[in-house]
Image (cartoon, coloured by chain):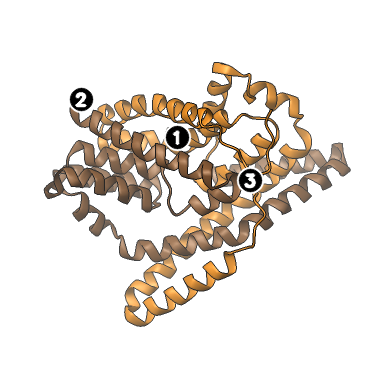
Chain colours: A brown, B orange
Amino acid sequence: MFTEALWILAAGSLASSFLKNRGKTKNALRFSWKYFEGMALPVLATVWAIGLLLAFLTPHVIARTIGPESGAWGVMAAAVLGSVVLIPAFIAFPLAGAILNQGASISAVAAFVTTLVMVGILTAPLEAKFFGWRFTLWRNGLSFVFALAIAFMMGRIL
Amino acid sequence: MTKKRNPMPGVLLGLVIGTFILFVLDRGKGVSAALTAKRYLVEMLSILPPILVLLGLFESWVPKTWVEKAMGPGSGTRGAVVSVLVGTAAMGPLYVAFPVGLALLKKGASVFNLCVFLCAWASIKIPMILFEVKFLGAEFAILRLALTIPSIIIISGLLKTFRMNIPGIQRS
């Protein structure tokens, strides 16, 4: 539904832009194309890499790594796993809930969920293409450290 | 975007070879890899064209002074709030946020606000929070959110302190 809304919004904006000013609209589409050209191959590579990786990191493997017996190392492993995999929220949260119910620690689950959203190793090359490696490594590195901090704090509080 | 020798064809070739080897060694895993890749590709193709069109329109219509004022180096707390809201309101996976962030940056947004925007886009989404409440409990979700927001501000502040230079973007 959101996707449809996005298409309608884009089409409507494009049409009204065209009616108002053809030159600016042409320019706009040139910008769009430039973005597309820059993104096409890296995006394809990223998608492919996700496919390859997720063939090995199945929900089963993830659950076992973060599971109840994994202990303090489990928190670290959970943070690393969350950084590497890239799964949509509608799979990630039920999975995290299942792992928590199996008896995994709050910290491990929090670490997994937080790095899952904030740190992206697979998307890092794409991010670096836009903002450079220095920015990308620092943003992801700091996010990783803070995810661990959040995880341990949550383990203490809850 | 940085202009260097394009490593992409090599990367893609490596992935093709990797997939082929996987397919030969373990047919089931090879098929599942291909299916996952296809699913993500379809998702990407369904969301990227309208985003790119909107980005192009943004580039050609929105005056630089607007963005500079709202999210520029002097925008302070209000700029951070705007960045969080822009990041939260938008939808879609993080890789869609990259071109949007670059467009904001080119229009004069500060590096601090770029980082706030990217992190907010990644981690604060209303539907995502609802999912988290449902599967991990309200206590868990709210506490994590409460810890995440200050973390984002600190991370962005550190990035600003380290004077990150974004290739191709000049900042006075």
Against B73, is A84 above or below?
Answer: below
Local SS, label 1: loop
Report the mark closest to the observer, 1 or 2: 2
First in residue order: circle 3 vs circle 1: 3
Q: Residue at x 66, y 40 (%)?
A: A9
Q: Quadrant of the C terminus of chain B?
A: top right
Q: Residue at x 62, y 45 (%)?
A: B99
- Residue lying furthest bottom: B24
Q: Position of residue A11 (x, y in %)?
A: 71, 45
**What amino acid does circle 3 point to?**
Ile
| Residue, disc 1 | B125
Q: Chain of mark 1?
A: B
The reply to whether dot 1 and dot 2 touch (C-beta < 8 Å) is: no
Q: Position of residue B59 (x, y in %)?
A: 74, 39
The reply to whether dot 3 and dot 1 touch (C-beta < 8 Å) is: no
**What amino acid does circle 1 point to?**
Lys
Distance from the alpha carbon under mark 3 to that under mark 2: 40 Å
